[in-house]
Image (cartoon, coloured by chain):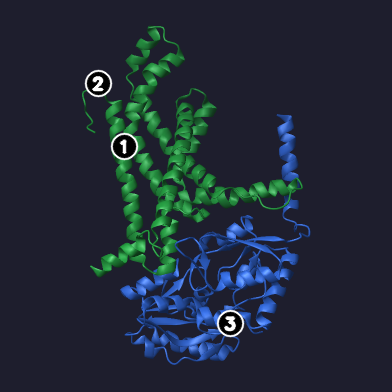
Amino acid sequence: MSKLASLAIAVVAVLPLAAAPALGKDWTTLKIATEGAYPPFNSVTPDGKVVGFEPELLDIVCERAKLKCETVIQEWKGIIPGLLAGKYDAIMSGMSVTPKRLEVIDFSIPYTNSPSTYAVLKSSPLLKALGEDKRVMLTDDAAAKASAAADSKALAGKVLAIQTATIQADFAKTYLPEVKTRVYETTQEEDLDLKAGRVDAIFASASSLVATLEQSKGEIVLAGPKYYGGLFGLGSAFGIQKGQPELKAKLDAAIKSCIDDGTIKKLAEKWFHVDTTPRQ
Amino acid sequence: MEDLVAYFTLIGFGPAGWGVPLARAASMTVAVSLSAFGVGIVFGMVGCWAKLSRSVVAHGAATVYTTVLRGVPDLLVIYLLYFGGSQAIGAIARAFGHQGFFGLNGFVVGMMAVGIISGAYQTEVLRGAYLAIPRGELEAARVAGMGRLLMLRRIIAPQILRFALPGMGNVWQLVLKESALISVVGLIEIMNQTRLAVGRTGAAFSFYITGAILFLLITTFSGAAFRRAEAWAMRGMGGRVRA
């Protein structure tokens, strides 16, 4: 018993050390988690292959970073806890860099930056009410507030769909406090309820709405202003554990080369029909 | 008619059909549920023994076990084991100078989590079954000079089985439905596979209804199996259960 007790004391005594950053690691292999249900970023085919913008970019990034990469599928809800628990080394799943997430994990430089906007049924009066397609930078506070106020007015008495734990949800909370919202786990549920009439509009990132538009065969369309920057952060990046400078440097260098030589522009136009290359 | 053809192409076994992954996912659901049910029986037997034991410690521990596990959400137990478990193991291992990945296999974690939860229900089912054995039979066996093991084999076990089977059938259905929660650990069972297929195709109704049919098929077949088992356990008892 005393042996067991002393072992327990030893374990408790050294536990705080475990929180210290791991020593420099020579990265040769990388295990990457993806949601697999977020087209066109990533989705899984019947034969279990992950396809989309991200897997194609990942192949190139891994080749340039000289990493042997393996992809695992992980539900969105548990994707950050899984990284923290060490189930995999990185997340590549259309995850935006946000201050809130930066409190728990680190990010590479972004590899895509898509605006956030509304999607409505083509027959909906909101298509007109939300106004024209214009670029609004959240860094321009006055313009952002004016635009959001106009949106709130158009959405009065309507219900807006947002996905849980997304920056679009944060936007709705901060800029559209009077608008009634419904929170969804997945984008498909939002699409279904928009068609069913349970909500009147979806607020999401334009690149994730590409799949919604394609699957609806013209029934659902984009509407209103496109919001960039500020709260929406810098775009999507690889999420990695804190204290991994070697891994971050490797990924950053590979992403930068993909931005510089137009690889990302090419892939974005193929998958999103719009250039989402991040620009600082 | 056209819609029906489209539906069967979608869930069929053709090149663009999801038949193969869905079948694989269904067998994964059955495999993880069966394993979890087995783990649950082991926990249930230990729990039942402890609850009936005269030892205050064993009885107290079993009461805490059944109260806590039946009182907290199942998803929480799975998260705790899967994410919390490997963080704890990882922290301890790193403290001893190891580095790298300390993963608990998703199947094992799912099996243990659902097994431990269902074990709490099994405990109560088995305890109830034991208490349903007429005391007179136990006394008679003791008077006849049976040892504890012989008594367990001839008197207690067959009757516990008879009384517990209907309750165990309920626990099995519970386990089967809880297996859908295991999708959070990344195991590709029915729930997770339909989610992925909906994500890819947007055909939510087709795939969720297919998932529901798969679950119904499994519960129907296992329900029939339990009825047969009950009929067998009740043989010679006046045929109160029909197969």
> Closer to the camera, B148 or A2?
B148
Give the residue at x 46% y 78%.
A210
Residue B236: which numbered mark, if any?
2
Amino acid tagged 2: Gly
Q: Which residue does the image show at 49% across and 22% down from the upper left?
A: B54
Q: Secondary structure at mark 3?
A: helix
Which residue in the structure is indicated by mark 1?
Answer: B225
Chain that appears blue: A
Horizontal and vertical percent position of residue B87: 64, 51
Amino acid at pointer 1: Ala
Height in image: A21 above or below B3? above
- Tell whether B102 sits left or right of B171: right
Chain containing mark 3 = A
Tell us which disc is closer to us: 1 or 3.
3
Q: Residue at x 33, y 25 (%)?
A: B132
Host chain of mark 2: B
- Sort mark 3 into few (<14), some (14-19) or many (20+) by Cα contacts within 10 Å: some
- Secondary structure, mark 2, is loop
